[in-house]
Image (cartoon, helix red, strand yellow):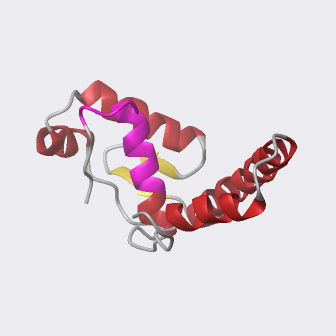
Amino acid sequence: MFEIDRYGRTPIYEQIIEKTSRLISAGILKAEDQLPSVRTLSEKLSINPNTLQKAYSELERQGICYSVPGSGRFVSKNAAEIVQARALTLLDEVEGLSRRLNAAGVVEERVHGAVSRAYGRGEGQ
């Protein structure tokens, strides 16, 4: 369920946050599902439990999960909406970046091509 890239540039705790968000967005993790315990996941992934604790704490801060003392952490009821809203804010960033690309003289077709490749539909895969 969780895979990490130990050699990538993205910190492991951020990868855990992103992967959890993707699982929620894809409907694999649903409201009230229990997240793997810090101990279990740290052993499975061979990473420091403090790293997972940091990721889970951030997910709680964002409202994506909540903890029940003695029972673990669970996906919050509105986690999917939170993840979706956060994803939609990225559209604002895409729009701003598109304006900058336009101002720099990059033709629209190249931008469309880049987006298509990112979605796995364009040339040069």
Quadrant of the frame with the C terminus:
bottom left
Left or right: 75 as drawn, with respect to 81? left
The answer to whether one can see residue 78 in this image is no
Q: Position of residue 17 (x, y in %)?
A: 44, 44
At 24% from the left edge and 34% from the top edge, which residue is drawn? 6
- At horizontal 17% and vertical 42% (from top left) the residue drawn is 45
Extent of the magenta region: 6-21
Q: Residue at x 43, y 63 (%)?
A: 124
Q: Main secondary structure of the magenta part?
A: helix
Q: Position of residue 111 (x, y in %)?
A: 68, 58
Against 114, residue 5 (above or below) is above
Q: Is residue 107 above or below residue 52?
A: below
Residue sitting at x 52%, y 60%:
118
Q: Give the position of the N terminus as an image quadrant.
A: bottom left
How many numbered discs sit on the rendered protein? Answer: 0
Residue nearest the viewer, comparing 8 with 56: 8
Residue 49: image x %, image y %? 24, 30
Q: Nearer the viewer, residue 6 or 114?
A: 114
Does residue 20 show up magenta in the picture? yes
Spot occupied by residue 57 in the image (x, y as percentages of width and height): 47, 35
- Can residue 113 be seen by looking at this rendering? yes
Q: Quadrant of residue 100?
A: top right
Q: Does the magenta run of residues contain 123?
A: no
